[in-house]
Image: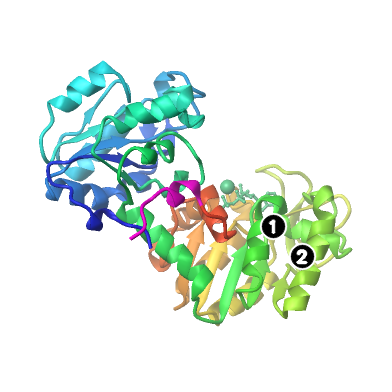
Amino acid sequence: MKKTIDNIELAGKRVLLRVDFNVPLKDGRITSDVRIRRVLPTLNRIIESGGIAVVMSHLGRPKGRVVEELRLDPVAERLSELLGRGVEKLGDCIGPDVKEALGRLGPGDVVLLENVRFHPQERKNDPGFARELAGLGDVFVNDAFGAAHRAHASTVGIAGHLPAVAGYLMAREMEVLGKLLERPEKPYVAVLGGAKVSDKIGLIRNLLPRVDSIIVGGAMAYTLLAAEGAPVGKSRVEEDKLDIARETGKHAAALGGQIFLPVDHIVAQAFEEGAEPVEAGSEIPENLMGMDIGEQTAARYGEIIGAAKTILWNGPMGVFEWDSFAAGTRAVARAIADSDAYSVCCGGDSAAAVEKFGLADGISHISTGGGASLEFLEGKELPGIAVLQDR
Ligand code: ADP
Ligand code: MG
């Protein structure tokens, strides 16, 4: 067990809080503030305890230089609205001006440092840069679960200089995802989809001994189907992963687990939003590609989901961003939301699908981690978690 902010003294302390405010932006406006909202309990705790919150985050991929569009000003504004108090946004995350500004703060104040990725040293986990960041605080709290799989200066290096603990969001992610690996109530079903089987092989391997069944959709289903010799037409198949896919099938069989693959599909002539959706059975004609699972598959998956006590969902069942190919993902999402099982959704696109369909309330936990949750569920120790103090 890792220490959390409940296990340290915060009063009068400068609390360097690393968060993941990597919010989606369109024309300089925040299109979803979920990532900001999820950190509010931690921030409120710091404020109420009389700590001084010095918040740091990354935003986008500025590649180590200042990118005007990736400044955190709109985030500070939104955070201020949500907290109901002023949030000063500083022009940088290190340097004399930052130090001076912090010197003016008192208990309960909140400041947001500028995008840490404006400095190339951040992603290199540069020791000097990490020391400078650490110099801004008395304690380090990491609530950036979404960045915990990266060994950067503001997530890992900094912890070498300060007492380092988890915020509430980080603690909850560790608890929820840890439960999926340690003591899931059975039947335990994993629903896997998304773009590439290569992204998810590690996950499948680690889940196989733990789950009762894995149901598969999305583009990754076509690589698994092709590995079995099924006709998949022009569907997206990772040719270099066919061997691994075959091995995985054997591994599953040996463990007595079951991997369910789609039995029908929605196919199209081209990977285009306007492409005409066509129903296909288990054999996809040569000139067509799989874009979504079919109705029969969705119904079958719905039954398996309905009987589960624990559900892990990662990866959409089809190209849900386009309405013609969203039905399979919507049906599966609804089945998960309607079930009484303990359900966890992870992955950026899957979380976006849940929001798009308005089903978030029916899911027990929507993880804020994309890559981080996948690596956690693969059984890897995340560097951003490893450096936090044990209880
Ligand atoms: P997550 O972010 O939830 O982990 P992924 O990033 O693995 O999910 O995959 C999401 C993407 O997979 C979506 O953009 C979706 O359009 C795409 N996808 C799903 N099914 C297919 C398919 N049959 N063909 C091509 N792309 C697909
Ligand atoms: Mg994704």
Q: Which residue is mark 1?
A: 201
| Callout 2 crowding tier (Cα within 10 Å): few <14, some 14–19, many ≥20 | some
Q: What amino acid type should be assigned to the residue bearing mark 1?
A: Ile
| Image location of residue 103, percent across then percent down | 15, 26
**Does residue 203 lie above or below 56 as drawn?**
below
Q: Which residue is mark 2?
A: 248
- Is residue 370 shown to the viewer in this render? no
Residue 331 as seen in the image, left or right of residue 163:
right
| Image location of residue 226, percent across then percent down | 84, 59
Mark 1–mark 2 Cα distance, whole angstroms, equals 8 Å
Q: What range is drawn magenta here?
A: 382-391
268 and 113: which is toward the camera: 113
Q: Residue furthest front?
A: 161
Looking at the rendering, in which quadrant would you find the C terminus? bottom left
| Callout 1 crowding tier (Cα within 10 Å): few <14, some 14–19, many ≥20 | some
Residue 214: within the magenta? no
- The earlier-in-sequence mark between 1 and 2 is 1
| Image location of residue 51, percent across then percent down | 16, 43
- Is residue 366 shown to the viewer in this render? yes
**Does residue 29 lie above or below 259 as drawn?**
above
